[in-house]
Image: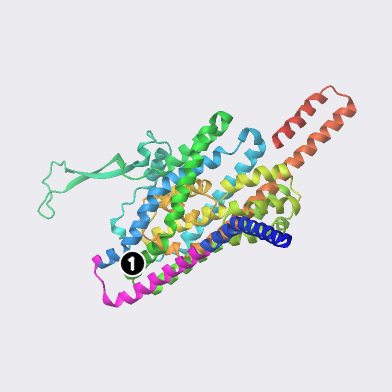
Amino acid sequence: MPRSKMESKAEKTTSKSRCHMNRILPCDCRRLRSEELLIILTVAGVLIGVLLGVFLRPTCPSDDVIILITFPGEILMRILKMLIIPTIITSVITGLSGVNLKRGGKMAGHATVYYLTTTTLAVIIGMVLVSIIHPGRSYFDLRSADDVEIAPSLDSFLDLLRNIFPDNIIGACTAMVQTRTRKIASPVNSTSYPVRHNSSFLENVTLVKTLEVVPNTNVLGLLVFSMSFAVTLSSIGRQGKPVKEFFYILNKIFMKMIRVVIWYSPIGIGSLIAGNVLRMETTFGFIETIGWYMGTVLIGLLIHCVIVLPAIFYIITRNNPFRIYKGVFQAWLTALGTASSAATLPVTMMCAERNLNIDKRVTRFVLPLGATMNMDGTALLEAVAAVTIAQMCQIDLNTGQLVTISVTATLASTGAAAIPGAGLMAVLLILSAAGIPSEGIAVLWSVDWILDRLRTSVNILGDCIGAAIVDHLYKSRTKKIQKHTEIVSLKGNSSHLSYSDDIEAVAAEQN
């Protein structure tokens, strides 16, 4: 009898522990399985779309048939465009408002300058490579070049500045300003007999420029306003906590909606790819376009992490930059597996503190800030993807449009969520800002699950290089202050108090 009671008690304990383990372990396992399942479904959707397009090409389907085939993908694009603006805005406000700039002091300033500099350089590398390699070789006749109105570069640049500062933030959600050039003809004023040409009098043509409101989302204006709002919200401290929580909850809701929509993406991507294959001149063009696009992104990421980041680190610290890569190798591998900067953050902080001996006060401030702001690889891919789609649509981009793509890619990557697949979502935002059709994005989406891991690993390397640079600057600054303090104390100068105050200020900044 006692034995049966003990057995029953043991069984109850075992069942409780099993229930407890089932509440913990299967959650992670389900999450991993769902991510793997989504990748498998996406690859299957791409293959089915390609095969469907190849098999239907000999039948020469009509335009109505192609429209019906691509209709599920059109619905996917419409849903994503509906969600991308509120998601990006809430992500920017949530991420930047959580940065305590007053507490970080100069540490926050140095880290922010570094992140913006490396992101801008990554975008420039991507723009240069995509212009040289030209991965979007005109195999897709998504839009004729004759239908595209190309504005002068000066007008496009001035429009860029006008749209950065919209006069109505609500109106910026649905409209933007654009300079339009119209031709106004007037009869020739001459005392001689008029010359006839095609049974009509020759006319003088006058070009008149007017500012018009175009029905398109002013992406740059919304991003700049969101960043300004977030920085101001961060500066008011505890008073802004309810507003921070409001935008945090909104961001969680929109991200949840996007995760649900992503499960529909294999169907939409497959239908869009089938339609693109049917519109191609040759089926080989699909594979070649993807190959050149992937090659351009990989070359850009390689240049950025092997040349640009080590060069910046060596110029500032005069130390070997590749020891940083050796120390954070585990975090780099984790980023390749998870494709998420946020999920890799604990491993990144552990590697930086244990292997590189970076001060904990630096890692606990700079690395979380980098997971939000520093998206070098993402910014490079966004720029390359946007220009590649423009090339696929046979659109010749002028200087103003290239600047628009560069600025939007830099700002959009700053607010991109640190989750898998967030980079290509921002490409829709950039295409909208530059006025480029988004139909070709499905072709690039088919390989994003590979490039997502590579660009995330580059983001992690950039975060660690930034943390090492900030740590070097503050250690050298502290040593200088301590040396001055020792000299002053030996001389017995009364100005010792000013140096001690400076040390306390440094400690306050670092804390």
Check residue 350 for magenta coloring. Answer: no
Left or right of 329 on screen, residue 453:
left
The outermost residue toward the top is 494
Q: Main secondary structure of the magenta part?
A: helix
Q: Quadrant of residue 221?
A: top left
At which x and y percent is residue 333? 64, 61
- Indicate whether 414 appears above or below 441: above
Q: Quadrant of residue 52?
A: bottom left
- Indicate whether 358 appears above or below 480: below
Question: How was the colour assigned to the protein in this rendering?
Answer: rainbow
Residue 329 in view here: no
SS at mark 1 in the image:
helix
At which x and y percent is residue 191? 13, 41
At which x and y percent is residue 422? 49, 53
Which residue: 45% across, 66% down? 41
Which residue is at the front of the view, 247 or 151? Answer: 247
Which residue: 75% across, 38% down? 477
Which residue: 40% across, 74% down? 284
Left or right of 13 on screen, residue 171:
left
At which x and y percent is residue 473? 72, 42
Check residue 58 for magenta coloring. Answer: yes
- Indicate whether 73 appears above or below 213: below
User: Callout 1: 10 Å neighbours few (<14), some, many (20+)?
Assistant: many
Which residue is at the front of the view, 194 or 489? Answer: 489
The outermost residue toward the front is 1
The quadrant of the picture occupied by the N terminus is bottom right
Residue 406 in view here: yes
Amino acid beneath label 1: Gly
Q: Which residues are magenta?
A: 36-64
* Residue indicated by mark 1: 275
